[in-house]
Amino acid sequence: MRTIKLANYFFKSTTRDRSDFFWLLVFPIILLVILMLIFPSLYEPKEVTFNLVFLSQEGMFSEIIEKVFKDLSGGRYRIFRLSIVKNTKENLDREMERLKEKKTDLIVEIPEGFDAQMLNWFMLKNLGMTASPPSINIYSLKHNISSESAYLTVKNVLQKLELEFIKRIGYKLKEVKSETEVIGTRSTFSYIDFIYPGIVIFVVFMTGLFGIGMHLTWLKESGILKRIMVTSLPKSRLIISYVISRIYLIVLQIVLISLVAKFLFKTTVNPLSLPFIVYTLLTIICLSSLGFFLAAVSKTTSGANAISQILNFPLQFLGGIYFPVSGVPWAIRWLVLINPITYLASGIRDALGIMKSPYPLYITIIVPVAWIIFCLLFTIKRFKLEEV
Amino acid sequence: MKIIWKLFLATIKIFYRDKMTFFFTLMFPFIFVIIFGFVFGTGSSGGDNKLLIGVLSSDEEPHKIISSIENLEARKFDNAVDIRQNILSGKLDAGLLYEDNKVKLILNLAVMQRNPFSRTLGETIADRLAKSSVKIDKVIDLNLNTIDPGEVSTTGLGYMIPGVVAISIFNGALFSMLSIFSYYKKRGMIKRFNVTPIREYQFIIGMISGRFIVTLFSATAVLIFSQMIFNIRFDINWSLYLITASSSILGMMAFGILISILFTEPEVASNIGSLLMTIMIFFSGVYFPLDFLPKYLRTIGGFLPLGYVAKSIRISTSVESGAISSVLNVSLAMVFAFLTLVFIFGSRIFKTE
């Protein structure tokens, strides 16, 4: 009974603290909402219309290309917001300025003599001779995702048009079909299914660093632990009470996140499924151990805070909580490889069928278990030294 | 003047002795530059946006075609299993299987997120293979000219760094005001100053100028060290940069003052500040593009000052072009916001003591 009372005390002392309440219970929900507002639109852009400028020339081929772009610029689901202007130096200079100002996404320029070059190319080809193909100039803006995407779209349109031109002059083209397979994820990728287990790891991580590491250091520093330890309460009960209070907190966090993910964002992940429960338990034990380790190495709250902040962002971002991390150079790849979150996030997503893990499943269990053993052994040793 | 100078020096000393503030102002932006720079900036082959493709085909043609495409590198494989494993482990960016006139492009989500070009790769290679069957390479040569938005040509990371400097300014200025106007008040420090001969304006000028210099120094250090570490070249218009950075610091300090006036509890004010910072980081367009966001979110992003500060610093460092008048307008708005809030609320913190 006293154990539960003490657990309740620890739990209440955390949730009554405005800062802890905000960071451990409110902030993860806000973060989930922000991520859901931004990332789905990056993976699956919807209703995107590009501002395209077409610098035209007179001539049959130029007009065919112009007509194709005009057709793609009409209707409710148009791809382009097309502006056709005559190709002159003044117009090109003006449009380049507009491109730099991001008022235009892409410029397609049909150069002078394009039609003549096209005719020449076809004639020489018919005679079995080779000729250099005529050029179309495209201007896109660096570091601008709209401009890059507009270029890809225009490139695809012109590639199809090329095939059409070749067929029209009598060549029998080999039909090459193409398909794209995205591996390591479900056929219909959903960002909420991807991010929901990630946010669960995030809340446990935050609790490990701040709700355990910092909180326990504060209890030590303020002398509360010492005072409790001079009472008749055995040391083991004190530890059990503290662990129970953290379980209350983590369960409350996961329930809140799960409710938001399920009812607001309609995740298909079942939080009661066996893989989810197993990996969530592994996450709780692993990242809580990290919190105890932090409390063992820190003598003051400000020291614990400094270590937590240093660990916080690199481990979160390089652990793949928010987006998959791959192809990073060795300078920081080692940080990805020693990070327990990397394996927890990969493991839970793989086990739920959301995204294939780049590591074998047993590795996603062994590495966190190794972290647990290391952190707990270290904590037991250091805590004894400090408290006895 | 002597009092202001002493307060100014004391503020600078406190900053460098306070490990947490030092970390958040100077180290924190660096950590972000390194993480985002490496995660979004490079592919498996190490270069900017270069894709390494594993090819399985009995025909030499796909290998030749891929090698001829700019920014692609082809590597031959004997079986599809190896290709898949290499993609999953991040050693390959994509795989291409070609058999019976069928092209199958294999990608993983991480590559799609990092390089939008990869989505259309299968179609491009299929079209090139179709054309190669009639010995035609291309009918139309697409001559792509990527225009640098500014006067200097820089990498994706180089374009991002001025935004990180803007975040550093926001962070340093906002939290320094929260510490003066919220924490100092809560700890009774202002009460103690009230009983000394120090006058209100001396206290405010001394404290703010100290934090101002510290924030300016930190933001500039991020800019200079990033150039050195990542071998990036900026063409910094120093006078424009100093105007932009200084006015932005004052503008962001105004934000800090406003928050500490609206939320008198230091912890609440600090949480609101952190929340605001999170929102600004995500919706200012510094790390994540806003182009494909729903219109209402882009409108919200348009109201956040961080995006304008980032743009002004990009213009000052010549990675983006823009009218100097627009930079000066942003600067004027920032200074105006600062002066208004300091005059209205500056003396209030003493009165409420």
Image (cartoon, rainbow, N blue to C red):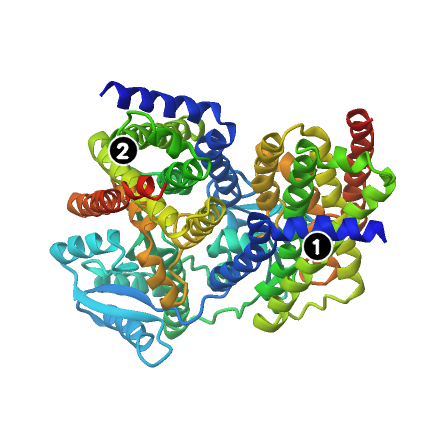
Q: Is residue A83 shown above or below A217? A: below
Are the residues tagged 2 and 1 within 8 Å (C-beta)?
no
Q: Residue at x 61, y 47 (%)?
A: B92
Q: Quadrant of the N terminus of chain A?
A: bottom right
Q: Chain of mark 2?
A: B
Q: Nearer the viewer, residue A334 or A281?
A: A281
* Quadrant containing the C terminus of chain A in the rendered view: top right
Q: Amino acid at mark 1?
A: Ile
Residue A58 placement, left or right of B217: left
**Would you identify the image quadrant in which residue A156 lies?**
bottom left
Q: Nearer the viewer, residue B169 or B18?
A: B18
Q: Give the chain of mark 1.
A: A
Q: Answer above or below: position of A62 versus A207.
A: below
- The residue under the point 68% across, 35% down is A217
Q: Is residue A133 visible?
A: no
Quote the CA–CA distance across marks 2 and 1.
Answer: 47 Å
**Left or right of A379 in this view: A73:** left
Residue with the mark numbered 2: B200
Estimate how packed mark 1 is, as few (under 14), some (14 to 19) or many (20 or more) residues with alpha carbons within 10 Å: many
Question: Is residue A166 in view from this perspective?
Answer: yes
Q: Residues within 10 Å of mark 2 (few under 14, many from 20)?
A: some
Report x, y in % for residue B120: 48, 61
Q: Secondary structure at mark 1?
A: helix
Residue B42 location, x and y as percent? 50, 42
Q: Which residue is mark 1?
A: A250
Image quarter of residue A334: top right
Amino acid type at circle 2 is: Glu
Reply above or below: A11 against B196: below
